[in-house]
Image (cartoon, helix red, strand yellow):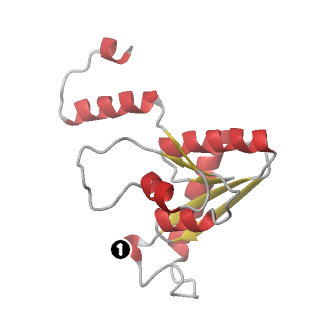
């Protein structure tokens, strides 16, 4: 069971769903976080055998650790857990991590974009198209949409009526 982790609310929802699936299947949970140095660094994730970006790698490890503690608390998910950070783009790292046909890749689907034909497909869409195993794209929690609405209204300095959030 492979779960993509970014640390955002969508990946926390995906982690919970992946842990549930792992429990049902009697499998281990493999939480994977992709990281890149600012600007992408030189070459691809496999082009440099030396460790030239330890501070960014350590920050990624901290983000993964924080996401796991936020999702599951100090007790963990209740299934065997393996956590890994990998240098590269999330789409490539996750497709590579779920390389067996009997794996299940769980990713957060995120919010839908308004711009059609964006230059890069979402990570979930890329994984659905390229992973050699089944992919479960977990929709965002409905509370995320409400939080996004509040943030957007705050950014535009619009009045917020709490009754609008009760929906």
Q: Quadrant of the C terminus?
A: top left
Q: Crowding near pointer 1: few (<14 within 10 Å), some, many (20+)? A: few
Q: Residue furthest top?
A: 163
Say which residue appears at 54% left-offset and 49% top-offset.
107
Task: Report whether residue 52 is seen.
Answer: yes
Say which residue appears at 51% left-offset and 87% top-offset.
47
Which residue occupies the foreground of this view, 163 or 129?
129
* Residue 128, x across and y down, in percent: 49, 54
- The reply, left or right, for residue 128 in relation to residue 118 is right
How many labels, in total?
A: 1
- The reply, left or right, for residue 151 in relation to residue 68 is left
* Residue 59, x across and y down, in percent: 53, 64
- The reply, left or right, for residue 26 in relation to residue 121 is right
Vertical order, 19 against 85 (above or below): above
Which residue occupies the foreground of this view, 134 or 49?
134
Which residue occupies the foreground of this view, 29 or 119?
119
Residue linked to disc 1: 39
Task: Report whether residue 59 is seen.
Answer: no
* Residue 56, x across and y down, in percent: 50, 70
Vertical order, 6 against 73 (above or below): below
* Residue 93, x across and y down, in percent: 54, 67
Vertical order, 167 against 106 (above or below): above
Vertical order, 130 against 29 (above or below): below
Say which residue appears at 55% left-offset and 56% top-offset.
63
Q: Secondary structure at mark 1?
A: helix
């Amino acid at each position: 069971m492979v779960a993509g982790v970014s640390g955002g609310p969508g990946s926390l929802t995906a982690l919970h769903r992946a842990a549930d699936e792992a429990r049902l299947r009697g499998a281990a949970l493999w939480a994977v976080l992709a990281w890149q140095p600012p600007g992408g660094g030189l070459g691809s994730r496999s082009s440099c055998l030396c460790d030239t970006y330890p501070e960014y790698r350590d920050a990624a490890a901290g983000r993964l650790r924080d996401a796991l503690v936020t999702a599951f608390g100090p007790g963990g998910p209740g299934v065997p857990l393996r956590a890994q950070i990998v240098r590269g783009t999330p789409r490539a790292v996750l497709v590579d991590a779920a390389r067996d046909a009997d794996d299940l890749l769980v990713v957060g689907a995120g919010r839908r974009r308004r711009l059609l034909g964006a230059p890069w497909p979402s990570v979930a869409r890329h994984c659905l198209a390229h992973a050699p195993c089944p992919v479960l794209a977990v929709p965002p929690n409905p509370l995320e949409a409400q939080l996004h609405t509040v943030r957007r209204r705050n950014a535009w300095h619009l009045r917020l009526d709490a009754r609008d959030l009760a929906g």
